[in-house]
């Protein structure tokens, strides 16, 4: 009983963690390299708003690249996950490490972002997602911490299961977070400075998305 009361990793978890981290770090560096090239071509004096118009074929390739990046993360999660729930947490971990490494590489190579309040284009599908760097990093760190918690809880034979209602709340929260990132998309295409980021919307939806997993984790530990 004493052994089961302690949080511990399952056998093989350290090896899996190493290779998943290696892949995500490499993806983050690769993504940053592409952005360095794009900024050299279209923002030689530094990234700024409104976004520079680029040729249609380049825009198509960029959108396709983003879609393929997500597909690659999904593929690795599908191959390495033990079950559907595990694949969900693995994908979140890959996404989180990838995003953090992406910004760390840009900071090292370009000296950007110069602060966590610097605005960035996060995604282009179906419209530009724009936000200060701080907010996607909050999401990414939460995804990484969630994966670690998932591994520790499973190490003692339990699982973090939000339940059907919890998943519904989490999905609604995730949709709200995406909405907050798309809130200023039109201004990103037209204005030199996007308006204020909808912090209240982001915060409320972040809590809504996170709460089911926190409650599920507490329930799993009690069981």
Image (cartoon, rainbow, N blue to C red):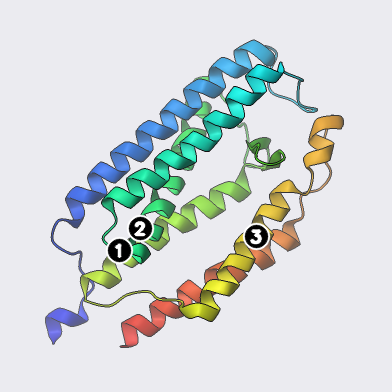
Crowd around label 3: few <14 · some 14–19 · many ≥20 (10 Å) = some
Q: Residue at x 81, y 31 (%)?
A: 189
**Element carrying mark 3:** helix
Q: Name which of mark 3 and mark 1 comes first in the sequence.
A: 1
- Residue beneath label 1, please? 83
Residue 75's quadrant in the figure? top left
Q: Residue at x 86, y 31 (%)?
A: 190
Q: Alpha-carbon distance for marks 3 and 1?
A: 24 Å
Task: Specify whether 49 is left or right of 124.
Answer: right
Quarter placement of the C terminus: bottom left
Which numbered dot is residue 87?
2
> Looking at the image, do the residues carrying marks 2 and 1 touch, with CB atoms under 8 Å apart?
yes
Q: Position of residue 194 (x, y in %)?
A: 81, 39
- Residue beneath label 3, please? 175
Crowd around label 1: few <14 · some 14–19 · many ≥20 (10 Å) = few
**Element carrying mark 2:** helix
Give the mark toward the camera: 3 or 1: 1
> Looking at the image, do the residues carrying marks 3 and 1 touch, with CB atoms under 8 Å apart?
no
Residue 217's quadrant in the figure? bottom left
Quarter placement of the N terminus: bottom left
**Element carrying mark 1:** loop
Q: Alpha-carbon distance for marks 2 and 1?
A: 6 Å
Task: Specify whether 130 is left or right of 66.
Answer: right
Which numbered dot is residue 112?
none
Q: Position of residue 212 (x, y in %)?
A: 51, 75
Crowd around label 2: few <14 · some 14–19 · many ≥20 (10 Å) = some
Q: Alpha-carbon distance for marks 2 and 3?
A: 20 Å
Q: Nearer the viewer, residue 114 or 149?
A: 149
Relative height, residue 30 to residue 158 (above, below): above
Task: Specify whether 54 is left or right of 140.
Answer: right
């Amino acid at each position: 009983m004493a052994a089961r009361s302690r949080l511990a990793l399952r056998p093989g978890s350290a090896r899996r963690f190493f290779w998943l981290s290696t892949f995500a770090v490499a993806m983050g560096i690769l993504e940053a390299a592409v952005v360095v090239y794009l900024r050299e071509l279209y923002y030689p004096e530094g990234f700024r708003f409104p976004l520079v118009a680029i040729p249609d074929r380049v825009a198509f390739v960029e959108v396709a690249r983003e879609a393929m990046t997500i597909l690659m993360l999904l593929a690795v999660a599908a191959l390495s996950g033990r079950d559907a729930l595990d694949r969900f947490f693995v994908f979140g971990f890959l996404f989180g490490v990838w995003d953090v490494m992406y910004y760390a590489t840009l900071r090292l190579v370009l000296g950007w972002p110069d602060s966590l309040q610097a605005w960035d284009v996060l995604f282009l599908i179906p419209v530009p997602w724009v936000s200060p760097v701080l907010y996607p990093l909050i999401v990414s760190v939460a995804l990484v911490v969630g994966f670690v918690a998932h591994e520790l809880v499973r190490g003692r034979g339990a699982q973090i299961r939000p339940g059907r209602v919890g998943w519904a709340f989490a999905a609604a929260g995730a949709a709200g977070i995406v909405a907050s990132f798309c809130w200023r998309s039109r201004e990103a295409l037209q204005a030199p400075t996007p308006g204020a980021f909808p912090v209240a919307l982001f915060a409320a939806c972040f809590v809504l998305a996170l709460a089911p997993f926190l409650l599920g984790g507490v329930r799993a530990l009690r069981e």
